[in-house]
Image (spheres, rainbow, N blue to C red):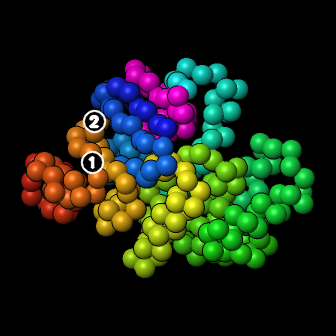
Amino acid sequence: MIKILDVHKAFGEHQVLRGLDLQCQGGETTVIIGRSGGGKSVLLKHVIGLIKPDAGRIVIDDEDITDLGEYRLNRTRRKIGMLFQNAALFDSMNVGDNVAFPLVEHTRMSGRDMRAVVAEKLRLVGLSGIEDQNPANLSGGMRKRVGLARAIALDPAILLFDEPTTGLDPIMCDAINRLIKETQQKLGVTALVISHDIEGAFQIADHIAMLYEGRIIAQGTPDEIQNSDNPYVQQFIHGRAEGPIQVV
């Protein structure tokens, strides 16, 4: 469903991605782990077409989006829902209008049908009946769930998650990870997750890939990653200061 082929990206003299290769199988959850500032969010922006690679290709559902014009790129983006790190809700809109935003932008659905879709998506994330609330009055976990409801409003084939548990306490982290897994399984979508939450990654992933110095240096099932003999992987997943990854 997602193919990232020999992708290079630099910002000025800073080389972020250095020939990165990754394939995400349809109907599975792939989690990318790696250090802060290592290019994980930059990679997500390539997948959704917000950034173009300096070299290499991004293929979504057998369509190379690398050089697509804006019209065809927007058509492809409709297959993709994204939950941003901070949920990125509009505080000037109530919850219902936030969830309905993609429907307003991309469909000609009637107001009645939109309200039905909004109610269904909020039900799926466990937040029935909060359409009239202001996002500013919600907890961090509730904001993430509203963001997820908005991400699935157009019934996407692909869901992208940028650090979905950042800023949440351990109990809410577990709740969000369970929700990601349940949503992926119920909807049958392909999920690509960027995460520092190692325990959560092992909980939700079918496939884990470690990004280091602009490349994928190891990938496999959660068991394969846990049992990897790669010293970089072992240092990272166990959170050790000592090892080949330098602390600077």
**What amino acid does circle 1 point to?**
Gly
Q: Please give left or right for residue 154 compared with residue 236 in the image.
A: right
At 73% from the left and 71% from the top, the residue drawn is 134
> Disc 2 versus disc 1: distance between alpha carbons?
15 Å
**What amino acid does circle 2 point to?**
Arg
Q: Quadrant of residue 237?
A: bottom left
Q: Return the x and y of residue 125 as percentages of the image width and height.
A: 62, 69
Q: Nearer the viewer, mark 2 or mark 1?
A: 1
At 52% from the left and 66% from the top, the residue drawn is 182
Q: Which residue is mark 1?
A: 220
Say if 68 sits above or below 15 in the image: above
Q: Return the x and y of residue 110 as percentages of the image width and height.
A: 90, 53
At 66% from the left and 40% from the top, the residue drawn is 78
Q: Which residue is mark 2?
A: 215
Residue extent of the magenta highlight: 42-62
Q: Earlier in the sequence, mark 2 or mark 1?
A: 2
Q: Return the x and y of residue 173 as percentages of the image width and height.
A: 43, 72
